[in-house]
Amino acid sequence: MIEIVKLTDSRLGESERLQRILSRSLGLDGEILAQAEAIVRDVATRGDEAVIEYTARFDGVALAANGMLADRQLIEELSAQVDQELLAAMREAISNIRYYHERQLVRDWEIEGANGVRLGQRIRPLEIVGLYVPGGSAAYPSTVMMNAVPAKVAGVERIIVATPPAQFTNNPIIAAVLKELGLFEIYTVGGAQAVAALACGTETIPRVDKIVGPGNRYVAAAKKLVYGAVDIDSIAGPSEIVVIADDTARADFVAADLLSQAEHSEDAAAILITPSEKFAVAVRQEIINQTQTLARREIIERSLANFGALIVVESLDAACTLANRLAPEHIEVMTAESEATAAKIRNAGAIFIGPYSPETVGDYFAGTNHVLPTGGTARFSSALGVYDFLKRTSIIRYTQSELHRTAASIEQLALAEGFDAHARAVTIRVEE
């Protein structure tokens, strides 16, 4: 079961438990990377033929090149199977996500300098994006929404979906959300071979500019390997939550939120940081009580045993310091002065403030994006957003008079780097 760990200010970050949590990784070992690399190279060389062979081997489905594109009528039929109340909830969530992300749009801009010089930036959407939708027994329509809506708001002209062959028949809700988003270019290909096809292009599947969406370790490895040939969203690690709470918070609320992350997987991390040992004990008991009734109890218990912790520190300032070191995907703040506490957080994918802002609302409904940095990468990266689907081009308009004025300085800088041809490209224009 989950451990209680006491840390003094002088030992913050030194406990073995924290080091174990921080040591979590994607598990992209050499063997997985080597297998993914072989698949990527093969698809790059043989195209559709390789994709069909790997689909037969890994998914047990015999595809034909002309059968990769999902039938639109099938999408319509599967969508019709979804409960109307669920559809209504999905549509409201999409509306919330669109409303939030529309505020992230940026426009072209221009400034004017001396002698008529004009400099600016031109903002344009990516032309074609690949969205990977993982298969398996579970379905994640919320992740489809979180990836597709910002791309559409950004103005991406073409969004291509790749998903394992049985995904639609197993999970009609995926067909329903894709239909609702107007995404009908769907290729029934999964795994590393799908990532390779999107990155390299085949006779049937077009090459994209960027690949987004989660997947298993082979998908993650393939995304890592193709990065540079195309852009990717990130290499996502195991999910994680840190709750900062004092004894004014409700122990049952905190326990429920920790459990909501622990049920993701056995390597998810659920951490409470509190200045109250009494509160930590109360949360631990709530975790024990609530776990008994949960469907994913076995996963939760292993997750909490492996990477859970109830950390008792000397003060809320220490709690914030430790949270910033962890730089987690999610931070919840439930203290007597939640806003003041949250203001001290610098490193987090998302911050949920107050007792009625559980992380779950961000996962599904609030409108903020749940594709967040994990594994401490919130120190330097951010949630997925509209800006991830935009490219920025610098615009330079120099004038003859300004080039004459600055030519000598430019020449000196070019020659200092040993580039006399660079220098000549300027001086040739002023030697009149």
Image (cartoon, rainbow, N blue to C red):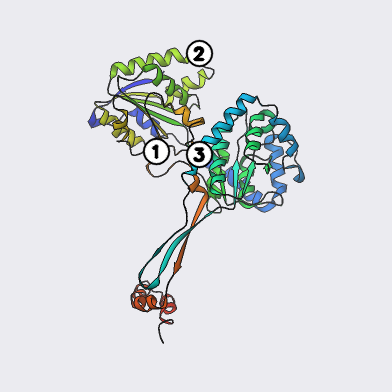
Q: Residue furthest bottom?
A: 432
Percent across and percent down for residue 179 are: 66, 37
* Residue 175 in view of the camera: yes
Q: Which residue is mark 2?
A: 293
Residue 319 is situated, as x and y percent measured from the top left of the image, at 29, 29
Q: Is residue 413 above or below residue 10?
A: below
Percent across and percent down for residue 55 are 69, 39
Question: Which residue corresponds to the image point at 33% horizontal and 15% vertical from the top-left?
Answer: 281
Q: Amino acid under label 2?
A: Thr
Q: Is residue 354 above or below residue 397?
A: above
Please tell me the numbered disc located at residue 376: 1
Q: Which residue is mark 3?
A: 99
Q: Secondary structure at mark 3?
A: helix
- Camera-near label (2 vs 3) is 3
Of the residues shown, which amino acid type is indicated by label 3? Tyr
Relative side of 416 to 180, left or right? left
Provide the secondary structure element on which disc 1 rests: loop
- Judge by depth and name the residue closer to the eye, 302 or 373: 373
